[in-house]
Amino acid sequence: MTSPVNPTSYEVPTRNDSGLLTIYVPADATVTINGLPTKSVGTRREYVSYGLQKGLQYRYTVTAVVERDGKAYEETREVILTAGDKKGVAFSFQLPTENVAGI
């Protein structure tokens, strides 16, 4: 028989041991963090990382992919979070343009 769970013993992570990462991407972009696909949609996406220890740095590799005219374009950024951090990263997707004669 298992012991009942004491609801007062559950520790809810606080702002001091979490980090907030805000990502700005085109609405149709797919985003992965450390190789794992994310489910959020829209142009502004927020992700919280819990259980961060004070004094340590946590590296996140964020990759965004958009498809334009049947071709995939990918950008990757490295972000360092520490406990209590709020960081933002924007993906600009400066897509190559074709040179048009006379312009």
Image: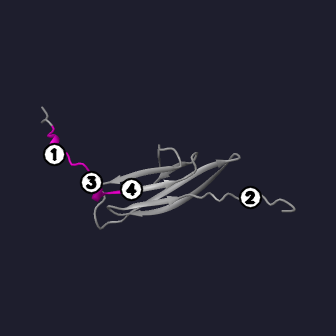
Q: Amino acid at mark 4?
A: Leu
Quadrant in which residue 18 is drawn? bottom left
Q: Can residue 10 be found in the magenta stretch?
A: yes
Q: Which mark identifies residue 94?
A: none
**Which class describes the residues within 10 Å of circle 2: few (<14), some (14-19), or many (20+)?**
few
Whole-angstrom CA distance, mark 3 to mark 4, is 12 Å
> Secondary structure under badge 2?
loop
Q: Residues within 10 Å of mark 3 (few under 14, many from 20)?
A: few
Magenta stretch bounds: 5-19
Ranked by sequence position, the earlier of labels 3 and 4 is 3
What residue does disc 4 label? 20
Find disc 3 in the rendering and name its residue.
Answer: 14
Question: Could you say where residue 93 lies in the image, as x and y percent from the top left?
Answer: 62, 57
The residue depicted at 45 percent of the width and 55 percent of the height is 22
Which of the marked residues, 1 or 3, is nearer the chain's N terminus?
A: 1
Q: Amino acid at mark 3?
A: Thr
Q: Which residue is mark 2?
A: 97
For disc 1, the marked residue is 9
